[in-house]
Every structure is written in structure tokens, then in C-alpha cells.
Amino acid sequence: MTTSATAPVPALELPATVEGFRAQFLRNLSFSGGVTLDEASVNDRYLALARTVRDFLMVHWLHDQHRQAEEQPKTVCYLSAEYLLGDQLDNDLLAGGLTEAAEGAMAACGIDLDELRRHEIEPGLGNGGLGRLAACFIDSLATLGVPSIGYGIRYEYGIFRQTFEDGQQVEQPDAWLTLGAPWEQPRPEAAQTVSFGGRTETDAAGASRWIPGWNVSAVPYDYLVPGFGNDRVNTLRLWRAKATDAFDLRIFNSGDYEQAVRAQTFAENISKVLYPEDSTPQGKELRLQQQYFFVAASIRDFLARLPEGFDLARLPERVIFQLNDTHPVIAVPELMRVLVDERGLEWDAAWAVAQQCFAYTCHTLLPEALEVWPVELLGRLLPRHLEIVYRINEEFLDAVRARFGDDEMRIRDMSIIAEFPVRAVRMAYLATVAGAKVNGVAELHSQLLRDKVLPAFAEFFPQKFTNVTNGVTPRRFLRLANPGLSGLITEAIGDGWITDLERLRALEPLAEDAGFRASFAAVKAANKARLNDVLQARDGMRVGDGHLVDVMVKRLHEYKRQLLKVLHVVSEYEGVVSGRVPLDALQPRTVLFGAKAAPGYAMAKRIIHLINAVGSVVNADPRLEGRLQVLFPPNYNVTLAESVIPAADLSEQISLAGKEASGTGNMKFALNGALTIGTDDGANVEIRELVGDENFFLFGMTEPEAEQLGRDGYHPAEFYQADAGLRRAIDLIASGAFSGGDRSVFEPIVSNLLYDDRFMVLADYASYMAAQERVDAAYADPDGWTRSAILNVARCGFFSSDRSIRDYIDRIWHTPPTV
């Protein structure tokens, strides 16, 4: 349905005062919740509070929707399979300037606002850095006043809830919707029909048309995305799958109840779980269904917003679809299908439009992470789209031949269709051919993307490739997560840094101010105490008093090298218990891990088991007198991150150089005053250049050195034999010391390290251990450490997602903010 440009401006206003907020809260409690204040449960009160906050934001959202319908500005449509939002309450109170009104209103009602904060369950809509980045970006788009819509999937269960049994990961459903979803607004009237399967037919004129085999309904649920302090509210639209014919009364009345609702069950599986296990053919098919489902619904949704009679040749003036990794790339043939088959554009005209409407962000350097879809599957599920991909590829390869001649190896290397090991569509190639721009997410990553991942394409399309280094929103990851530090910063330099993070540079002279250093150190100590309160209540854990807090929190993957951190812990432990290292020479340290492993990733799950096993032994050994401990709280999420990151002293960013695209955890830690120990990988390179070598603990091979070692032939066992400390650590694991004497438990990890070690843990071990010695020496000088921590904060303003979005606007989107 096209929005009318003559719709009246909404006249509704709500007074953002304590009394105005209180009155709206009580209305929601009674009329939406159906309870009075004295009989309301904690959940009733939380739901009413959330709805009240949403009501205040909705006023501004309605104004924005009217203005955009009237002005028809160019809009960023951010297509992402995940959005790791975190809790919404405090974020929306802060952005809407409602915190004081809400605090006063709750106090007037005799309600403990902190209790309601603790009651909130964060939406389970993302997995890790990709989803958290998407959440930061939509926050910055709203704060900068850029018209945008985030599109994704409303997963019923989202990422799994992690528990540990005997130290091993167990996945439980994340039923985040159980107690209600007050932040979302269902929009069933805007549902879209998405089709699958069937066949194609060719008419007398030679045109192909799709005859689908089945379809589902995509029902949108809107989340409001408020900008900070500017009364702007954008939209995050998430799609839920429902059957178009959900219930067959005739079959039900015959007594076959299961068959009567089978269509509904089948359809709803599409939006049931984030990243369904894809080690089976059924799982792969479900993932492709998910990806097509949300992009097809999103494209239809945006086109429905255009004025009647809009000239689709001008579509690039109205929209840019940003492809957040390869998950949404099936949007390319879908837009072509809609333009050609449904809207009647000629192929060449449609292709000229499509090539200006898409941009692609690559988030990986690992070849296996660049999605490919078997031709057999794609042809069975989306036959018309496969035809379109074939034609795009044919015309592209003709262009390659026209420039380079019949170089068969080049043609094979650049073809969107891979021939081995099975015939498949290479989605990153399709995105690169179709996209107006292709960007990496850190300077090193973008260079390697051009030189190593897509070199032939960079040669063919040099103008397409650019860099936009990732960033994080300072609203959530400094202002909200670290109120002590943000208050100290504001007292020193004013509050303009919240939307202009480069102003943190004004803190640099204060690193030499003894009084400011003392206040900064006091904030860090208070943050550790706060973390202890959270861990104690949540998991029965606590950080050791006076300990260096050494944190490694990120998705569990071998390239991130949690194993290298484990070897450090085992080496420290072995040194003390063997008597070679005096106990008082051991720097008191708490090593805190947080990580989830994909359910089908066996080695990652073994590493989790090893971390927990090492922690159980180390933490219980009286010979250490508590000077070294390992904590691994399960189910690490944004809410826990907001307590962990401000308390950290040391940030572990230790991936093999050339494997991490960017990272954003590294930015969050540095902005909160943690020093980084890391390789020259991803955004670590830019962090080190900004904060200075003296305030960063660099170790390990460079990317060229790691590549050369691989070319020369990497034999990890040689490093094991040559380094006595490494040998002792691995032998201790192999001996069964952390598995009750059972040598078989961690044998697969030991064998992998000695005979494969794809990510060169053993090659970087000696350098890493030497860097950790420098950490210990630096931490022994508290004043010097605090000075370095302040300089990390002061010099990392570059890593704001606001700056990232400005770079996207300047280099890729060309979407000016609206007044």
C-alpha cells in the first residue's frame, strides 16, 4: 500500500514530565495490562513501563513517517540476518531523554526501577559481532538523522541459551518472547507473500515466468530505533513467517489434527531459530529459505512505499540496499525478478538499476565463510532466481572475455558459478558483480579483501572497492555501560562526546593529572565491584580482589585462538605447581572467558570443555592461594557485556594475523580503559596506531609472515619440540591432568595442535608469553597502567559507529541526513 503524501501530520503529544509519564504508565498498566498498580506483578509493571516508553517514542516515529512519505528522501535499507540489540529499556530512555521522567514516575508509584531493569530479557535476534554491528549502525543512522529501515527476521527462539553440564556446552532454546514483547508493534496489514519452489515456463515471446509451488506470509513486526536527543525515530522491521493457509477445517473435523495444522508448522519453521544447524540437507535448505524469505519481503515492502506511478528507473535515487555479509545476497536476483517479471522493465534497464541499488559489506577473510549455494538446491527452491543468476554470470563473463580474452583459468576463477566440489553459486561473487560498492571493515581487512580474497574482481572493478572501518555506539557501550567513567568524562570535558566521540581527545592531557588518574582508577575499581555483584547473583562467581581482569569474550572459533589463551593459563599454572615459579612471582589474575560455539562445531565445543576443565582444576588448587583463576560464565550476551567490558584491565584480541576482519569488542574495551594484547590483525592495527605502541601489547607474526610460514610448510610439532614451556603445557593437558586422568578426553585438541594447527597457535606461543610478561610488568606500576588506560580512551574516538556511518554516507550511500 502506497503511503499518501497528503496524510495529516499527527497532532498527538505526550508531556515528557514525571506526572505525564506516570499517567501514561498507569493507563498502560490498566488498559493494556488489565491490572491495577497494587495487584501488578513485576512483569506487569515492566510491560507497562516498556509500553509507556514506546508510546513517547511513537509520537516522533509518526512524525518521521509522515515527513518521509512527503519528502521521499533516499533511504538506507539495511539487510541483515541478525541484530544483537541488547536490552531496550535504558537505551530508549536515554535516547528519548526520558530517564529522569521515568525515574521520578516509578518512584512516585513506589516501584524499584532497577528491579524492572533486571527483569528485562534482551531480544535473541543475533549471535555475535555481525549482529552487534548492525545494532550499532541502526542506532547511529537514527542519531545522524538518516532515513533508514533495518530489515531482518523475528526469530522466535533466536540464538540458543548456553548452559554447561560437566563443563560441556549444552544448547537450550532461548525463549525470549515468553514474558511478552512490549517493544514490538505487529503490522499484519503490511504482510507480504513470499513464494518458493515450483517451476519456470517460457511464453511465446521467449520470456520466462515463475510458477511457484508454495508460499508463506511474511508478517512484519516493527521496533522503534530512536536517535539520541534529536526526536528522530527510525524503524527496524523484522519478519515472522506464517502459513497463508494455516488451518484446514475439513481435515481437522475428520480427526487428523496434526495434518490440519501441518502447513502452519512448516511455514513457521522459517522464522523459528537463528542460524539453524546446517550440517544436514534439511538445515541448508531452511537457511536458504530464511534468507530469501526476509529479503523478498523487504524488497516488496520498500517498493510498496513508493508513490503511485513512480519511475523505477529512478529507484537508485530512492534507496540503497546494504547487504550485511552474504546472507542477504539473494536479494540481487529477487530485485531483478521483480523489476523484469512483475514491473515490466527490460533486462538491461533493470540491471542498470540493480547495480546502483546494492552495496556489499564483506565481513570475513575465511574462504569457508563466503557462502555458496548448490545449484541443485537453489534451482529446486528458487528456479527463476537461478535462471537470473545464470544470465548475470553469462553477461559478466562475456565482459571479462572482452577485456582479458579467452583466459580459461581467469574465467573459472571469476565465474559466479563454481564447478567444484559441486556446482554452486558463489554469493560473494554475485554481490561483487551486482554491488555499486564492496567494502571491508578495517584497513587491513579491506586491503586483504582486494589482494587475497577477491583480487581478480578488484582488478576488474577497482572503483568498487573501498574501506569503512567498523565502530560501536558510544551511547550503549560507554554512556550506558559505564556510567562511572562517562560521568567522569562529562565532568572533565562536557557531554558533547556522546555524539562526537573524537572529543575524547581532550582527555589526553589529563593522563598526566594525578587527581584525574586517581579518579579514573577509582571508577575501574567500582566497575570490578559491580561486575562481582552481577557474577555472584548470576553465576555464583567473583573476580579475585586486586586481580588483573584479563578478558577474552567473543564467538568460539579456532581462528580467534581461545586455545592460545588456555595455553597461557596452563603454562602459568604448571610453573607454580612444578615449583619452578615462586607463587609470589605470579601476578594475581582472573581470566574471564565468554563464548558460544555453533552447535555443530565439534572442535569449538571441545575447546569450551577444555577451558572449563582447566578452570575447575586451577580454581580449586590450594597451591595457588587464589592468585590465578578462570571464570567462564555461560550464555555471554550484551547484558553481561555491559558489566564485563567496563571492569576489564586487559583485552585479549589474539587472532592469527590476516584472519579477523575487524572485531568490535577490541574497540569497546579500549574505549572503556582496557589495554589490548593483540596481533596486528583486523582493527587492532588501527587501535595500535592511534593509542601508540607503548600503550598496546603487540605480539605474533604479521600477516605476510604467517602466509610465508604456511607456504614454506608449517610443522607445529617443531615448535612444540623447540620450546620447553610450550611442551610442558601441552604435555600437562595430554596427561589427563584436567580430565580426571583420562588422556582421551582432550586428545583431539592435542593432536590438532601438534599435527594441524591451522591457525598457528604454537608458532605464536613464545611471542604471546613474552607479551604477557610485559603485561605483568606494566600492571605492577598502577599509575603507569592508569595513564595508558586513559590514553586508550582519549585516542579511540575514531571507533564510533557515527563515524562509520558518515564514511558509508560519503563513500557508498550518498544519503544526506534530513532536517
Image (tube, rainbow, N blue to C red):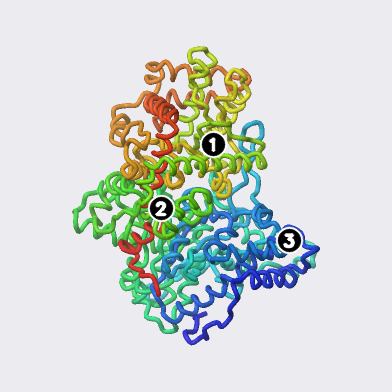
Comparing marks 1 and 3, which lies closer to the viewer?
Answer: 3
Q: Where is residue 410 in the image (x, y as percent from the top left)?
A: 25, 48
Q: Which residue lies furthest to the front in this view?
A: 515
For disc 2, the marked residue is 471
Could you say whether the residue bearing mark 1 is in a helix, strand or loop?
Answer: strand
Q: Position of residue 545 (x, y in %)?
A: 58, 31
Under mark 2, the amino acid is Gly
For disc 1, the marked residue is 593
Residue drawn at x 66%, y 59% is 265
**Marks 3/2: CA distance?**
40 Å
Which is more N-terminal, label 2 or label 3? 3
Under mark 1, the amino acid is Phe
Q: Position of residue 269 (x, y in %)?
A: 62, 57
Residue drawn at x 61%, y 17% is 741
Q: Residues within 10 Å of mark 2 (few under 14, many from 20)?
A: many
For disc 3, the marked residue is 110
Comparing marks 3 and 2, which lies closer to the viewer?
Answer: 3
Where 2 sits versus 198, above or below? below
**Does residue 617 show up?**
yes
Residue contact between numbered discs 2 and 1, judged by CB atoms under 8 Å: no
**Marks 2/1: CA distance?**
23 Å
Which is more N-terminal, label 3 or label 1? 3
Q: Is residue 254 left or right of residue 554?
A: right
Task: Please name whichever residue, 278 or 236, is drawn nearer the observer in this view of the structure.
Answer: 236
Residue contact between numbered discs 1 and 3, judged by CB atoms under 8 Å: no
Task: Please name whichever residue, 667 or 335, is drawn nearer the observer in this view of the structure.
Answer: 667
Where 812 sits versus 202, above or below? above
Q: Residue furthest top?
A: 579
**Marks 1/3: CA distance?**
39 Å
Under mark 3, the amino acid is Gly
Residue drawn at x 42%, y 46% is 667
